[in-house]
Amino acid sequence: MADSSPNLKTRLHEIIFEADTPAGKAFDLVLLALIVLSVIAVMLESVASVRQQYGLWLRTFEWIVTILFTLEYVLRLYCVGRPTQYARSFFGIVDLLSILPSYLSVIIPGAQSFMVIRALRLLRVFRVLKLAHFVGEASELGAALRASVRKIIVFLGAVLTLVVIVGSMMYLIEGEANGFTNIPVSIYWAIVTMTTVGYGDIAPQTPLGKILASAIMIMGYGIIAVPTGIVSVELAGVVKGKKVSTQACPDCGAEGHAHDAAYCKYCSSKL
């Protein structure tokens, strides 16, 4: 009897966290199906005609799924050696956020709409379908984005300064008579124009204003390309790691280990 609890935890961990066994893969496929169906149910409930006819059925289904996900979240915390560490991990936070909206909707009407965050749980499909190389590529992309943060912040600061200057110039050139009623509105126009969105709700009328607008539009294409170039350079410099395993750590639930790893790279527990 003394060994029953560890054996139960090990068995639950294999089913819930691993996709290498038939039971584990079946569990994950059912989980992914429930996630898709629940997200569809939330979207359908936002349609007035569907809500009037099937609202009760949709809400009942949402609560059934929420209770199942709550039980699954509790079991995930139970079968890992370090539940606090898993709860603070990306998937741990996503798992919690996927069930909170239903409970919040009891006191905050409409909060259930945030259940679409459950779609983030579909990221587990890479592990379920043994697409481990996608996990490795995602890690490289994440590393490139982290390395690009400072450069992109500096770039955005320069763009923000530019739209303030251009917006102020357009306010002086066009004035209130042509729709540029104040500098904030003119800055809004500059942002919309520079990003090549062009809503058309405000447009310059004077020849000088049109010339400035044309310059901003052309400049916008070059500005859009800059962040892409920054990330591309960093991505090219990322050293590719070893093949990634689909195995999850039994202690903290972390994934993304090398295929030949014997210990977890996050908590040093044996895999």
Image (spheres, helix red, strand yellow):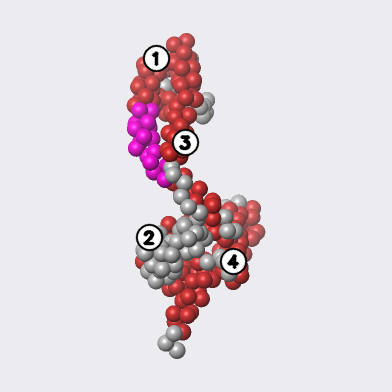
Looking at the image, do the residues carrying marks 2 and 3 touch, with CB atoms under 8 Å apart? no
Q: Considering only order in the chain, which callout, 1 or 2, is on the residue closer to the N terminus? A: 1
Label 4 sits on residue: 25
- In the rendered image, which residue does mark 2 sit on? 266
Q: Which residues are magenta?
A: 143-160
Residue placed under numbered mark 3 in the picture: 232
The Cα atoms of the two marked residues, 4 and 3, are separated by 35 Å
Q: Which residue type does callout 4 highlight?
A: Lys
Q: Which residue is mark 1?
A: 173
Closer-to-camera residue (92/97): 92
Q: Residues within 10 Å of mark 3 (few under 14, many from 20)?
A: some
Mark 2 vs mark 4: give the one in front. 2
**Magenta stretch secondary structure, dominant:** helix
Q: CA distance from mark 2 to mark 4?
A: 24 Å
- The answer to which of marks 2 and 4 sits earlier in the sequence is 4
Numbered tag placed on residue 118 in the rendering: none
Question: Which residue is painted at 37% across and 24% down in the image?
Answer: 162
In the rendered structure, which amino acid carries the disc numbered 3?
A: Ser
Q: Nearer the viewer, residue 135 or 170?
A: 135
